[in-house]
Amino acid sequence: MKINIRLKNESETRRLGEFIGGLLKGGEVITLIGDLGAGKTTLTQSIAKSIGIEEDITSPTFTIVNEYEEGVGLNHFDVYRIGDSDEMFDIGFDEYIESGRVNIIEWANIIEDILPEERLEICLEYEIDGRTANISSKGSKYDEILKAIEGKFKIA
Ligand code: ADP
Ligand code: MG
């Protein structure tokens, strides 16, 4: 399944993130793809807020992953500086994915070859007057999430 949603401003990006966060139970994988400034971290912050994380979320650019324990928990990856997918195994990527926390991966396209097959993938396209989110689901759990999003947001 695949849908496009038009996000006119930052608050619309945050509204989408908060809605998605409300659908998560833990253990999900959400991959974020888009250029610098496309809104990946903004979306992560709003998802984190709605799963009950009160700490400030910043991109873990130098650490690759930040873990948050509140609520169902969050593993927030930013793999921008990773040289090779193999480095992800060195940091225990599989254990994170199996941890039961929500997993959000910024720049997921860089480690495409090791991503779990089943996931929600959000591609953010930068536009001068906003963003377009192309959201696709792989796997029945994520199809359900996408259907809920489709029912709530105006499709571009
Ligand atoms: P990334 O993590 O992809 O590099 P950030 O979330 O750090 O991007 O930054 C995105 C920037 O774009 C922020 O300044 C934010 O205010 C802005 N932004 C987010 N969503 C939108 C939108 N829908 N329209 C316009 N600006 C947006
Ligand atoms: Mg970022």
Image: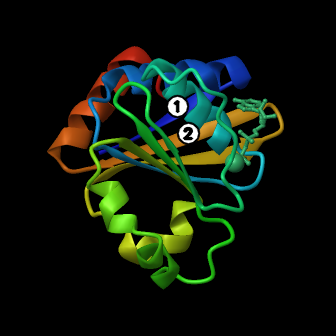
Where 63 sits versus 58, above or below?
A: below
Q: Earlier in the sequence, mark 1 or mark 2?
A: 1
Relative to 35, 94 lies left or right: left
Residue placed most toward the observer, 101 or 29: 101
Q: Residue furthest left?
A: 140
Residue placed most toward the observer, 154 or 53: 53
Residue 119 position in % (x across, y down) = 32, 51
Residue depicted at 66% across the width and 66% down the height: 80
Residue 156 seen from this side: no
Relative to 84, 7 lies left or right: right
Residue 146 seen from this side: yes
Q: Which residue is mark 2?
A: 133
Relative to 82, 91 lies left or right: left
Residue depicted at 63% across the width and 43% down the height: 40
Amino acid bearing label 1: Ile
Residue 8 position in % (x across, y down) = 70, 23
Where 153 sits versus 43, above or below?
A: above
Q: CA distance from mark 1 to mark 2?
A: 5 Å
Which quadrant of the figure has residue 124?
A: top right
Residue 107 position in % (x across, y down) = 59, 60
Whether the residue under disc 2 has CB within 8 Å of ligand 1: no
Secondary structure at badge 1 equals strand
Residue depicted at 52% across the width and 31% down the height: 5
Characterize the local packing of mark 1: few (<14), some (14-19) or many (20 or more) Cα atoms within 10 angstroms. Answer: many
Secondary structure at badge 2 equals strand
Which quadrant of the figure has residue 146?
A: top left
Amino acid bearing label 2: Ala
Where 28 sits versus 11, above or below?
A: below
Residue placed most toward the observer, 25 or 31: 25
Q: Which mark is residue 5?
A: 1
Whether the residue under disc 1 has CB within 8 Å of ligand 1: no
Residue depicted at 51% across the width and 24% down the height: 53
